Image (cartoon, grey):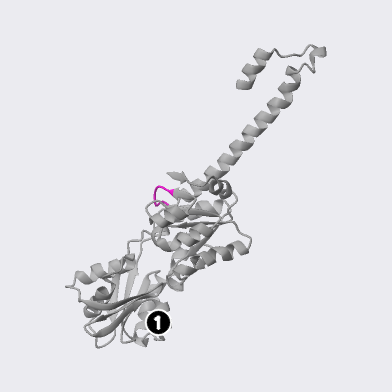
Amino acid sequence: GILVKDRLALERMRHVDAVLFDKTGTLTKGNHVVVEHVAVEGWNADDMLMLAGSVESESEHPIARAIVSAAQERGELKATGDVEALTGKGVRATVDEQQIAVGGPSLLDTLGVTEPQELQATTEQWRRLGNSVLHVMRDDQVIGVITLADEIRPESAVAIDDLHRRNVRVVLITGDAQQVADGVAGQLGIDEVFAEVQPSDKDSKVAELQERGMIVAMVGDGVNDAPALARADVGIAIGAGADVAVESAGVVLASSDPRSVTGVIDLSRATYAKMLQNLIWATGYNLLALPVAAGVFAFAGLYLPPAAAAVAMSA
């Protein structure tokens, strides 16, 4: 289940000090589900969710699709206009002549909006559980919050334990809020977290680890991961991921099982060990057999007929 596209990637893998995992779709299943939605006083929670679903209706992001799916269960989405995607922050659009925006903490910071006090206890609790939290705003005022859960793959904890046993540092990178990322990292025993990272900044985080003297393998599956996969010492793409991610990587995993990453390390180390074994056998044989075949020890009655030498060489 391991496709090696670049022989140097396989060679470097045995030296890797740190593996940088993208969270969504790699350590988690990437199937977000709306768990709960709460509106501020004076707003109906379902009406707020419908506005959010309408704004997100044109997006293909897994979180957006989850919101749209939850909203459609409650009725027909509204028409939108002037849709603007704010990369790594959220999206906003005009719905019923209202300016509606949906996004995480970075969107609040960008718009200079503060979270209403009545929602703070709720969102704090959601983040402690490791859930994603999105705010819904009308005319730059928060009208409600939505929480989504992305189930952690059952294989992820095993994969990280296996990497630790191989003395490899595990790092998580995500665009999610710090508390959400910390929640996932705490469950899995991850060593370091880069949270609230813009898609365009992922490759700079790889460079940061490299500047610390680490040899870095990056594991990702999305379009946004491609620059980081290309910059890493070893880029590992999930086979089910975006084509551009697969093209940017030196190694492709046929499955989405993160345990395959340790398989690449083991393959690299086993290949190197086999090369050394072959070298030792060949060197040892030639050091012994060539002088004998050349008749150096003929005076002592030790010699090897050429035909016998040929058979020994083949063996």
Of 238 and 38, the residue lying toward us: 238
User: Residue at 39% of width from left, 55% of height from top?
Assistant: 243
The residue wearing badge 1 is: 108
Q: Residue 153: x, y in percent?
A: 39, 56
What is the chief secondary structure element of the magenta stretch?
loop
Q: Is residue 119 visible?
A: yes
Residue 22 in sight in this render:
no
Q: Tag 1's secondary structure?
A: helix
Vertical order, 103 against 267 (above or below): below
Neighbourhood count class around disc 1 (C-alpha, 10 Å): few under 14, some 14–19, many 20 upward: many
Q: What residue lies at 60% left-to-right and 39% top-to-bottom?
A: 273
Asked if residue 209 is positioned above or below residue 16 in the image, the reply reads below
Q: Residue at x 50, y 54 (%)?
A: 235
Quadrant placement of the C terminus:
top right
109 relative position to 171: left or right: left
Give the quarter of the image for residue 174.
bottom left
Answer left or right for 296 relative to 100.
Answer: right
* Quarter assignment of residue 210: bottom right
Quarter of the N terminus within the rendering: top left
**Over which residues does the magenta segment extend?**
253-257
Type of the residue with mark 1: Leu
Looking at the picture, does residue 117 appear above or below residue 76? below
The percent position of residue 66, horizontal first and vertical second, equals: 28, 67
Closest to the observer, 14 or 28:
14
**Relative side of 301 to 220, left or right:** right
